[in-house]
Amino acid sequence: MSLPTLPGGRARAIWNLRCPVCGVGPVFRSPFTMNERCPHCGEVFGRGEPGYFLGAMYFSYGLGVILITTFTGIIYLYFRNWRLWQLITAGWILFLPLVPAVYRYSRVLWLHFDRVIDPSD
Ligand SMILES: [Zn+2]
């Protein structure tokens, strides 16, 4: 079984935090609460498996490393005389407000990744 083509493409569905199967239904119903099923197509997001979203931690880790490294590099461009621990700490501080977004995008990235590599249910 292969996944149908999403309206607007998979990248757009991920950017808009949409269902990995139909690309229409929102994955989250509030900033921190996921829908159990897609409100549009009825897909069960967690596949009924306990611990299913542990895989999202890999995406969360990757996004965190990319963002903190980027912030640290940008800060270094402006404050070249700072020590490394100061640069990294400042990068962490800039990263903190993005934690809710990283949480949401890591879960949606995991959902899409999982459905692409294993579309069967
Ligand atoms: Zn759907």
Image: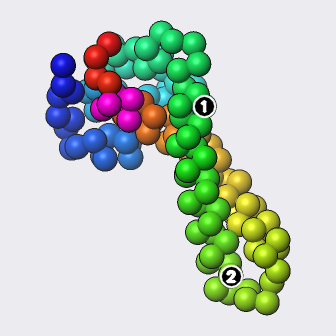
- Residue 76: x and y in percent read 68, 82
Residue reaching furthest front? 117
The location of residue 82, given as percent across then percent down, is 80, 83
Amino acid type assigned to the residue bearing label 2 in the image: Tyr
Quadrant of the snapshot with the C terminus: top left
Residue under the image location 82 percent in, 71 percent down: 85
Mark 1 element type: loop
Q: Residue 10: horizontal and vertical position, in percent? A: 28, 41
Q: In this figure, which residue is indicated by the disc labeled 2? A: 76
Determine whether, in the image, residue 56 is placed left or right of residue 76: left
Q: Residues within 10 Å of mark 2 (few under 14, many from 20)?
A: some
Would you say 4 lies left or right of 34 here? left
Query: Which span of residues is magenta-colored?
Result: 113-117
Q: Quadrant of residue 96?
A: bottom right
Asked if residue 39 can be seen in this view, the reply is no
* Rendering coords of residue 63 (x, y %): 55, 52
Are there few (<14), some (14-19), or many (20+) residues within 10 Å of tag 1? Answer: few
Q: In the figure, residue 60 lies in which quadrant?
A: top right
